[in-house]
Amino acid sequence: MSRIDAIIAMHSKDYSPQEPEVPTPILGFVPRKMRTIDVRGLKKDVKSRPGFYKDPLEDFMHKLQQSARLWAEYHDMDWSSKLQSSFDKIWNNLLNDEGNLRFNCKPIEVEDKRLLAWNLEWTGPGQSPLSETDDGTLIKAFPAIAILLLDNTIELIDGSCEHFMEIEELTTVKTKDLLEVHPFILHAVNSNMPYSGTESIQVPISPILDIMRVALNVDMYHNLIEVHGQ
Amino acid sequence: MTVIERWIAIAKENYINSHIAEQQLSLLTPVVLNLQIEEHKWYTKNTGSSANRFQIKPFYDDRYKHEFKLRNLNQITTGSIKHRIWIGDIQPKFNPKHEGHIARLEHKLKRELVRELAKDECLTLQQKERYQFVGFSLIDVFGKAIFNAMVGEYNV
């Protein structure tokens, strides 16, 4: 449609804006059947395997393959060589010429032990993939801060919510916005945007959320943020 | 009744449905899923059977008895009755082209379900957890049915 046609269509009320396109999943699939561990179990796991959480991208391609198999199982598909090779083609885009991942993930030192946080950066080559925010706006997925909550409760009565205050400091996103957009224990927030608040919070399909779900082998929806004492 | 209230209602109907198990959903089939009564007559099943005449049209094609399937994507995309019943304003222009579109729908449905449950002051925490579990399981089944229909049409 030409510009002039669009203007005429708008004036004749024939115009309905296109719904924004959702980016395709960066891994070629949406992680399914990941670990449905509860918060208590998660805390124990962090204690017993600190290395796993310190460097989530270690052995990432192997984790990716395992997750893709689970995805195929979820959708009742056989893990065929055809499926494997089509995923291999997509996963090649995650690697640079030296065969290293085109992004990195470094842990952030946090004061409150009820959360884990990582900085994710796109090292390239190429442009950072896009992610979507709640209103359908597309933003660059990287650089981002990913947060995993090890305590999913906010106690309004005794004010026990320091872990959420630290998330606010790290991400400059207000807790109420986070609860509104993505009330689950795994978060991804763009950390280098002229935007703030809800416009920086990534929702599925987010490359960061997908990568972290695979890297940590954790189901995002299994644990909700709970607000007590409302 | 809003879309989310319908999802809550179907979760309520299946609150004690033992086929919705903790670990896996392979026991669940259209035959054993309970459907709620719908007041809106356009949204009820088109059947002569008095047993289920007032039941809601399900989010799958119930001509398939043993698996949750849709005959084609048109059954659930914008403009269809099933879209009005089960998606509506949550994703007004739903026309999935890849799994990302379905995942976004699942996310929105789950989030709205959580919000709706949080508003209900009559339910205990345990009841809310069960409603949420059943609701999430059914939304997963819904997403799978859409995905399978999409795979059939686009060969993705």
Image (cartoon, rainbow, N blue to C red):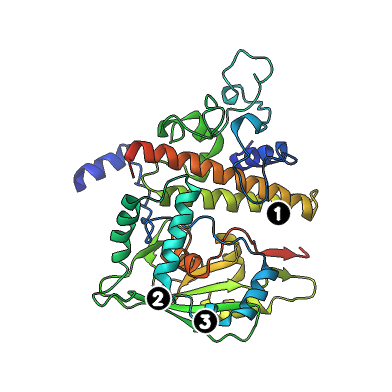
Is residue A152 visible from the viewing direction of this image? no
Local SS, label 2: loop
Asked which secondary structure carries label 3, the reply is helix
Q: Are marks 3 and 1 on the same chain?
A: no
Task: Name which residue type carries label 2.
Answer: Pro
Q: Is residue A33 left or right of residue B121?
A: left
The residue depicted at 78 percent of the width and 53 percent of the height is B126
How far apart are the two marked residues, 2 and 1, measured between alpha carbons? 33 Å
Type of amino acid at the residue the image marks with label 3: Lys
Does residue A115 sit above or below B19 in this rendering? below
Drawn side of residue B44 relative to residue A202, left or right: right
Q: Is residue A152 left or right of residue A182?
A: right
Q: Residue at x 65, y 25 (%)?
A: B55
Few, some or many C-alpha atoms within 10 Å of disc 3 (few <14, some 14-19, many ≥20)?
Answer: some
Q: Is residue A181 left or right of residue B146?
A: right
Name the amino acid, label 1: Ala
Task: Please rate how many residues cluster around mark 2, counting C-alpha atoms within 10 Å: few if below 14, some from 14 to 19, many from 20.
Answer: many
- Identify the residue under disc 1: B118
User: Residue B40's mark?
Assistant: none
Q: Give me the chain letter of mark 3.
A: A
Q: Secondary structure at mark 1?
A: helix
> Can residue A24 be seen?
yes
* Residue A148 vs residue B116, the one in the foreground: A148
Same-subunit check for callouts 2 and 1: no
